[in-house]
């Protein structure tokens, strides 16, 4: 449990320095709730082609990947770009100038080589949330394909709370994406979708070391990137001694807005 506590402390330290003004990321059809984190498989943690969570897998930040969590694999995490005392700096009440934090959770189920991940995100301290679904057929060699929808029930909004209170643009976004393993733990993903993923998007993740992974992506709006560091096994719980692993992410949205987060996979 020491390592678990240490990972929490590291996450807090990592999040502290980042500035909060992100007015550029808001605006009509700018999808600010999803410009820091996707809440999808690979968003802030790594996934292997077989659907297992592992630091040697493919990872991204705000864009989807072609691998989907399988049965018995789960991920929980938190990302933040603000320095407010409340980590969920809400975009409500006239505070759209500030970034907000997001917490996510998802789990996988499998059937005859098909994987499906179900999950979602809590978007602010007000408890507003959204749901995501992603499905993958059996891999074709090194290629994994996924079809998914972000914000299934179309509740997150597409421009920010103040804008969405005046005009509602749908934030339900369907997409298809493929991820190819190019060897030695490196992966390339390319996809196409609508709304949040309104054009071609893509990402690349490559290992820097056994624990450190570099991620670069184009999310249909801008380039983002960062480093994902695996803290390894950090805790065990339950009667079957389920092992929890954790990872830290440090990066930048649009090349200038710092973001940090921590994920737990088990």
Image: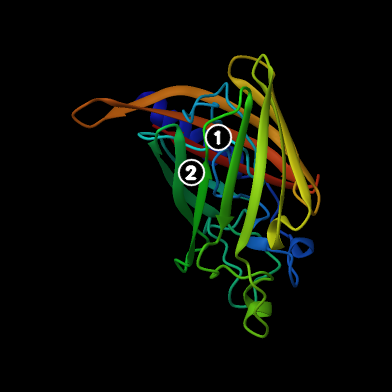
With respect to residue 2, does 121 lie above or below?
A: below
> 112 and 19: which one is in front?
112
Nearer to us: label 1 or label 2 = 1
With respect to residue 93, does 226 lie above or below?
A: above
Quarter of the image where one finds residue 234: top left
170 relative to 136 in the view: left or right:
right
> 195 and 129: which one is in front?
195
Q: Secondary structure at mark 1?
A: loop
Label 1 with label 2: CB-CB less than 8 Å: yes
Q: Indicate which disc residue 45 carries.
A: 1
At 52% from the left edge and 32% from the top edge, which residue is drawn?
A: 138
Q: Earlier in the sequence, mark 1 or mark 2?
A: 1
239 relative to 195 in the view: left or right:
left
At 54% from the left edge and 57% from the top edge, which residue is drawn?
A: 85
> 195 and 214: which one is in front?
195
Q: Where residue 103 sits: x, y (%)? A: 49, 51
Q: Where residue 172 sits: x, y (%)? A: 60, 65
Q: Is residue 62 visible?
A: no
At 73% from the left edge and 37% from the top edge, which residue is drawn?
A: 203
Count all numbered tags in the image, as a single digit: 2
Q: Where residue 255 sits: x, y (%)? A: 81, 44
> 190 and 141: which one is in front?
141
Q: Secondary structure at mark 2?
A: strand
Residue wearing tag 2: 77
Quadrant into which the C terminus falls: top left
Q: Is residue 171 visible?
A: yes
Q: Residue lying farthest left?
A: 239
Q: CA gap, disc 1 to disc 2?
A: 9 Å
Quarter of the image where one finds residue 35: bottom right
At 37% from the left edge and 35% from the top edge, which residue is drawn?
A: 71
């Amino acid at each position: 449990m020491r390592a678990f506590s240490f990972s929490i402390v590291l996450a807090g330290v990592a999040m502290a320095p980042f500035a909060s003004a992100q007015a550029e990321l808001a605006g009509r059809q700018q999808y600010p709730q999803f410009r820091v984190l996707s809440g999808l498989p690979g968003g802030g943690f790594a996934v292997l082609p077989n659907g297992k969570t592992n630091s040697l897998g493919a990872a991204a930040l705000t864009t989807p990947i072609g691998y989907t969590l399988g049965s018995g694999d789960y991920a929980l995490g938190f990302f933040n770009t603000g320095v407010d005392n409340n980590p969920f700096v809400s975009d409500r009440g006239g505070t759209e100038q500030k970034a907000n934090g997001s917490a996510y959770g998802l789990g996988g189920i499998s059937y005859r080589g098909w994987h499906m991940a179900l999950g979602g995100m809590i978007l602010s301290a007000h408890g507003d949330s959204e749901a995501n679904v992603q499905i993958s057929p059996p891999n074709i060699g090194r290629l994994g394909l996924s079809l998914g929808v972000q914000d299934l029930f179309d509740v997150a909004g597409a421009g920010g709370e103040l804008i969405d209170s005046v005009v509602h643009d749908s934030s339900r976004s369907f997409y298809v994406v493929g991820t190819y393993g190019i060897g030695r733990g490196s992966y390339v993903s390319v996809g196409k979708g609508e709304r949040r993923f309104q054009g071609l998007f893509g990402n690349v993740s490559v290992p820097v070391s056994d624990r450190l992974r570099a991620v670069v992506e184009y999310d249909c709006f801008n380039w983002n990137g960062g480093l994902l560091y695996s803290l390894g096994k950090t805790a065990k719980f339950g009667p079957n001694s389920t092992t929890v692993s954790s990872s830290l992410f440090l990066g930048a949205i649009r090349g200038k807005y710092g973001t940090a987060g921590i994920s737990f996979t088990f």
